[in-house]
Amino acid sequence: RTCDQLRCTACDFRVSLFNDYIWDQSCDYLFFRNNMPDLSKLRAKMIKKKGARAYACQCNWRSIDKLTDLQTDQRLRWVCGKH
C-alpha cells in the first residue's frame, strides 16, 4: 500500500501513479518536464506490465514491480501531500 497523495518538493508537482505500467527505458528528464501531467502524451512511453506501477512528477520517475521503500532513494524528493 502506498500514499496516493505524493508531492515532489523539488518541482512542486503532484506525483502521478499508473497501475499496471512501467516507464520505457528511453524516458528522460525533458520528456517528463514537457509532458507532465498530460496522460495522452505520457502514454507514448508507458509499457503495460501487470502488477507494476509507474510513478512520475515533472523532474523524477520510477517504475516499481516489487515491494520497494522509496524513502531509501536519496534522489527522490517525494513526500506525503496529506490526506
Image (cartoon, helix red, strand yellow):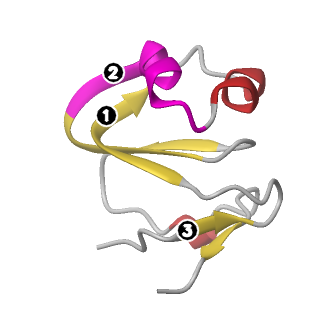
Q: Which one is nearer the viewer's eye here, 31 or 65? A: 31
Give the Cα separation between the discs numbered 3 and 1: 18 Å
Amino acid type of disc 2? Ile
Q: Does 45 sit above or below residue 13? A: above
* Label 2 neighbour load within 10 Å: few <14, some 14-19, many 20+: some
Camera-side residue: 35 or 71?
A: 35
Residue 9, above or below 22? below
Name the residue beneath numbered marker 2: 47
Location of residue 48 with respect to 1 vertically, above or below: above
Q: Label 3, on which residue? A: 6
Residue 51 placement (x, y as % from top left)? 18, 45
Taking the spot 73% from the left edge, 24% from the top edge, the residue there is 34
How far separated are the C-alphas under marks 2 and 1? 5 Å
Magenta span includes 38: yes
Relative side of 29 to 63, left or right: right
Front one among 18 and 53: 18
Residue located at (31% from left, 46% from top): 65
Q: Is residue 28 magenta?
A: no
From which residue to which does the magenta span run?
Answer: 37-49
Can residue 1 be seen?
Answer: yes
Q: Position of residue 59 (x, y in %)?
A: 75, 42
Q: Where is residue 36 drawn, in percent x and y?
A: 63, 35
Q: Secondary structure at mark 2?
A: strand
Amino acid residing under circle 1: Tyr
- Is 82 rendered above or below residue 56? below
Residue at the spot of label 1: 21
The disc labelled 3 sits on which kind of residue?
Answer: Leu
Q: Secondary structure at mark 1?
A: strand
Q: Position of residue 47 (x, y in %)?
A: 33, 21
